[in-house]
Image (tube, rainbow, N blue to C red):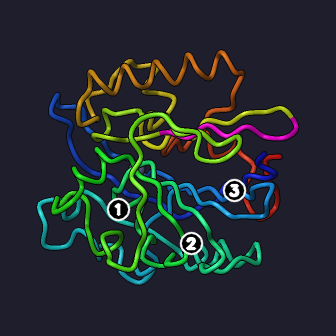
Amino acid sequence: MTVELYALPLGTCQCRFQTPTGRTIHADLPVSGYLLRLSDDKLALIDTGMNRLHVDDPDLTWRDTPRAGQLRALMSPEDSLLYRLAQLDVGPADIDYVINTHLHFDHAGNNDLLGSATFFVQRDQYVHALDNPRYPSQYWNLPALKYELVDGESELFDAVRVIPTPGHAPGHQSVEVTLPEGGSMIICGDAVVQADDYRLDDWSHQEDPVLARQSALHLRDLATESASTVFYGHDPEQLATMKWSPESAYR
Ligand SMILES: [Zn+2]
């Protein structure tokens, strides 16, 4: 059984681009990761945020690429994963497992720090991301890192289940966590970027909008069935309603 879940604030991704349908995306999106303390005292991370070197250089990842200026990582020193873990008295070598919802730079940016961990990624995502410039490999595709590739839905640990939610990217996965006090949480990753995606029923910002819509509706059904709290990928309006590390945790 999972004992605690800490939501870690990991900076802001500044987005400035147009979707293929002409919708202008002009948003400063919060980036987060989650630390789970499991009942056997093992530690698991869900997503690792943007690389800590962006604190000094917001354009580090996308400078001189077609996405230059479209995606910028705005981070204070406190937004580095290392800092957020240290606030909980956790070092990178203490992390036993990492679940990446997918391998985009804002979800796998600090995988390079976590050489003691086993990483769980859907096989379809891993294969898609290899040698793909949209998935900067310097952060995650390193010989020292141990990846365990997952095919479909799987209960990785007691009370922690991954659910395939493709559409944002092939092999994207979301995570359902059941907490001891009876609550359950669904961490969407970018299957649902913000609550507005449902309200507008607009999935045009996703790589495969049809598939993304199916995945998002599936998550909504699951959340209704299990009365889960849902954490969207990057929802500025949800920020104020969440409990954040280190002050508080979900139990
Ligand atoms: Zn994202």
Residue depth check, mark 2 versus mark 3: number of the one nearer the observer? 3
Reading the chain from its start, which is encountered first: label 2 or label 3?
Answer: 3
- Left or right, 188 with reference to 104: right
Residue 115 shown left or right of residue 214 in the figure: right
Q: Give the spatial CA distance, label 3 vs label 1.
A: 21 Å
Residue at screen point 70% across, 79% down: 86
- Name the residue that disc number 2 marks: 81
Disc 2 crowd, CA 10 A, few/some/many (<14, 14-19, 20+): many
Residue found at the very far right of the displayed protein: 181
Disc 2 residue type (three-letter) = Leu
Mark 1 CB within 8 Å of ligand 1: no
Please tell me whether mark 1 sits on a helix, a strand or a loop. Answer: loop
Q: Indicate the secondary structure of the residue bearing disc 3.
A: strand
Q: Where is residue 180 in the image (x, y as percent from the top left)?
A: 85, 40
Graded by Cα atoms within 10 Å as few (under 14), some (14 to 19) or many (20 or more), the crowding at tag 3 reads many
| Amino acid type, residue under disc 1 in the picture | Phe
Q: Read off the magenta span.
A: 174-181
- Mark 2, ligand 1, within 8 Å: the answer is no
- Image coordinates of residue 85 in percent, x first then y, are 67, 73
- Answer yes or no: do the residues labelled 2 and 1 have beta carbons within 8 Å? no
Q: Name the residue under label 1.
A: 105
In the rendered image, the vertical position of residue 206 relative to residue 89, given as above or below: above
Estimate the spatial distance between the alpha carbons at disc 2 and disc 3, rounded to whole Å: 14 Å
Q: Which of marks 3 and 1 is nearer the N terminus?
A: 3
The residue at 38%/46% (across/down) is 122
Residue underneath mark 3: 36
In the image, residue 48 sits, relative to residue 172, either above or below, namely below
Instruction: Give the quadrant of residue 19.
Output: top left
Hey, what amino acid is under mark 3? Leu
Q: Position of residue 135 (x, y in %)?
A: 26, 60
